[in-house]
Amino acid sequence: MTAFANAAKLQERPATRPVVSCRGVAKVFSNGTLALQNVDLDIKHHQFVSLLGPSGCGKSTLLRLIAGLGEPSAGEIDWPADREGDAHALSFVFQEPTLMPWATAIKNVMLPLKIARMSADEARGRAADALRLVGLSAFENSYPRELSGGMKMRVSIARALVTRPQVLLMDEPFAALDEITRFKLNNDLLRLWQDSNFTVVFVTHSVFESVFLSERIVVMAARPGRIIEDIEVAAPYPRDNDYRTSPLYNEHCRSASAALESAMAHHAHHG
């Protein structure tokens, strides 16, 4: 499909209810730190949204609240598309791959299906498919200690995708990887997202990564953590290395950098 046909397809996307909706969300930690204040955010079906901001601005906290790994102190997080009865509608990829060292790649990927009591044969088939999607078919029987950092992260992504989630939440998953590996995984993640039907909410502190991946960049400032800008990245998909060196990419990087600088200034002002 051409980039233009693809862009047209994006525009035709129905104006459905958001997949997840944050209204006036705040979070105060037990030590009194106001981690988030008055966050309003709607995320639509099949969007790729990055949360970008300096350390300590509450990006990961917001992601964890969306995941249900904690309750907001105020406001609400709503799933209008009603996920009741669909416990596997959401998957989370952490900063570290969090694999079980004693289990092979395929056993690690099968874990969520095993917990969901899927039959071993079906789970193994689904896990093999997920490993194929992330380019690791040849490593099904390898243990984490035998895999590179990038491969471990691929296993972690395969495990998140094996449940066929509606929403994939990713907390700086590529931050610890070298640049070449990170570029490769960014490319592969976009391909997986385009070929599928899930929504991605991606936490990063890299302007370059957010501009490469996202349709929308939600820029956050710290203390208290809040949204200060919501930038649309109007560049067609599929995006590849040509996009990374294009004037359009540079232009978007400049505006995201300016927003991030403004976030840091807010931080200095409030700090």
Image: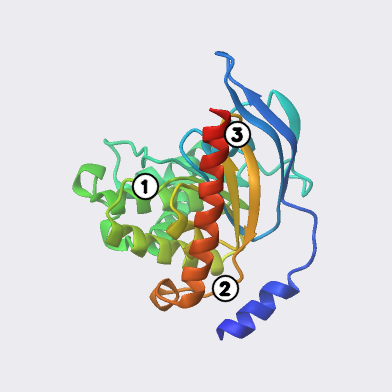
Q: Which amino acid, mark 3? A: Gly
Q: Which residue corresponds to the image point at 36% horizontal and 54% vertical from the top-left?
A: 154
Q: Which amino acid, mark 2? A: Ala
Q: Position of residue 90 (x, y in %)?
A: 60, 45
Q: Position of residue 57 (x, y in %)?
A: 54, 36
Q: Name the disc covering residue 225, or none.
A: 3
Q: Estimate the spatial distance between the alpha carbons at disc 1 and disc 3, rounded to whole Å.
A: 21 Å
Provide the secondary structure element on which disc 1 rests: loop
Q: Determine whether 57 is above or below 193 in the image.
A: above
Q: Nearer the viewer, residue 54 or 156?
A: 54
Q: Name the disc covering residue 263, or none.
A: none
| Residue 128 at least partly seen | yes
Q: Determine whether 259 is above or below 145 in the image.
A: below
Q: Estimate the spatial distance between the alpha carbons at disc 3 and disc 2, rounded to whole Å.
A: 28 Å
| Disc 2 packing (10 Å; few <14; some 14–19; many ≥20) | some
| Farthest residue, direction front | 269
Q: Which of 69 and 72 is in front in this view?
A: 72
Q: Which quadrant of the figure has residue 67? A: top right
Q: Name the disc covering residue 235, or none.
A: 2
Observer-side mark, 1 or 3, equals: 3
| Farthest residue, direction left | 146
Q: Which residue corresponds to the image point at 43% horizontal and 61% vertical from the top-left?
A: 129
Q: Is residue 98 left or right of residue 35?
A: left
Q: Which amino acid, mark 1? A: Ala
Provide the secondary structure element on which disc 2 rests: loop
N-terminal of the pair, mark 1 or mark 2, is 1
Label 1 close to label 2 by CB (< 8 Å): no
Reading the image, the residue beneath label 1 is 175
| Residue 117 at least partly seen | no
| Disc 1 packing (10 Å; few <14; some 14–19; many ≥20) | some
N-terminal of the pair, mark 3 or mark 2, is 3
